[in-house]
Image (tube, rainbow, N blue to C red):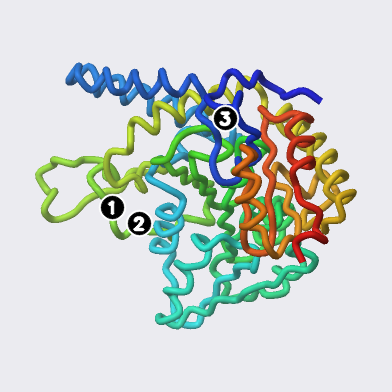
Amino acid sequence: MKSLVDKSLFLGLDSCTWLYSGAETPTLRGTLDAVNEYLHMRSKGPFGREKNTLVEAVCKQNVARLLHGRADDIALISNTSEAIGIIAGSIPFRQGDNIIINTLEFPSGVLPWLGLQQKGVEVRVVGHTNWQVSIEDILAQVDNRTRLVMTSHVSYMSGSRMDYRRLYQSLKKTDALLLLDVTQSMGVVPVYLEDTDFIVCSSYKWLLSIHGAGILAVNQSDRVRDLVFRTPGWRSIQEQFGPSRFETYTLHEDARRYERGFPSYASLYSLAYSTGFLADVGIENVEQHVLRLGDELIEQVRTRGYEVMTPDEPSQRAGNISIVCDQGSTVAGRLQQQDVYVWGGDGRVRASIHLFNGSADVEKFIELLPNPSSLK
């Protein structure tokens, strides 16, 4: 099976086997030109600022296209952790309220809620079964004091993909909002903003961009009408220099209310290019590619004697394939010395498949992956 796109479109893929996209992706050559354009536009004064505004608009349009939403739904900020913190600070939590998270969640989806415990907010943690979190187990924890359910679309740990659309259909019958982290899915499988209340995402993984940008998308329905952004910046408000600016302000009606100040424009130039690239390739095509290649990888690591954490069923996974390995960091280090990049730690090795991978990458990984019996 060949890669979906030519590897030469990326820097460095001629000298390594890259199965590391759950952490970082290699530099897309087109983003070099995009960032370079930003640097040159900085020297054009007001004309540069006009260009920045246009690129920001294109970036939001591309992101909205990937989320099947609208550009007005998109706020572009610094990173996913900031986006989650913004939501945490905007929901009017009261003592006795509760939040539901799960044991497959990345720390950025855990820490803000723990900080609310001192205000009397309960954090309910749903455990996983065989490295998957059941929707039924989540819903069993929901009651009339549940204000938010936080989950990743695809787990950074196990690679399992949650059917958040089915979860949301049940949550819409309650007052509990759904915050979906798509950092491990957006850019590789379809995501629909209409089937959650909030989406957060990083720029530098599956979206093929660089560090410095975070996505906060808001489904602007009646379910979020009581949210008040309490720490706005000058870009959050409608009139920055009006006569009453020392007394009051009016937030933007759309997602711009969550943008405090200027974004990292170098990151947005890059993200505008990479999201346009992905949209042109087609996320459905990317999904089909990684799932078929994932079938190959799962079959071969099992042949090597490893236990696979990631579900076999294609609809329940995306690009991350995790295998149980107590010495995961050691194995990843050995592979790295042979120019095979995977993630190792937390009792597993994770190989991440994207559109630039092919069967040769899987074969190289399997060839160098040590027999599990040799690690005991």
Locate residue 199 relative to residue 253 in the image: left or right.
right
- Point 67% across, 75% down: residue: 141
Locate residue 130 relative to residue 196 in the image: left or right.
right
The kind of secondary structure element at disc 3 is helix
Which quarter of the figure is the C terminus placed in?
bottom right
Calculate the distance from the C-alpha at mark 1 to the C-alpha at mark 3: 27 Å
Q: Of residues 367 and 17, which is closer to you in this image? A: 367
Q: Label 1: few (<14), some or many (≥20) within 10 Å?
A: some
Three-letter residue code for mark 2:
Phe
Three-letter residue code for mark 3:
Arg
Q: Is the C-beta separation of discs 1 and 2 under 8 Å?
A: yes
The image's mark for residue 229 is 2
Give residue 288's quadrant in the image: top right
As drawn, 224 above or below 113: above
Which of disc 3 and disc 1 is earlier in sequence?
A: 3
Label 1, on which residue? 232
Which quarter of the figure is the N terminus placed in?
top right
- Point 79% across, 59% down: residue: 374
Q: Of residues 114 and 206, which is closer to you in this image? A: 206
Front label number (3 vs 2): 3
Calculate the distance from the C-alpha at mark 1 to the C-alpha at mark 2: 6 Å
Calculate the distance from the C-alpha at mark 3 to the C-alpha at mark 2: 25 Å
Label 3, on which residue? 65
Residue 195 lies, in percent from the top left, at 64, 48
The kind of secondary structure element at disc 1 is loop
Give residue 148's quadrant in the image: bottom right
Residue 37 lies, in percent from the top left, at 34, 18
Residue 106 lies, in percent from the top left, at 56, 60
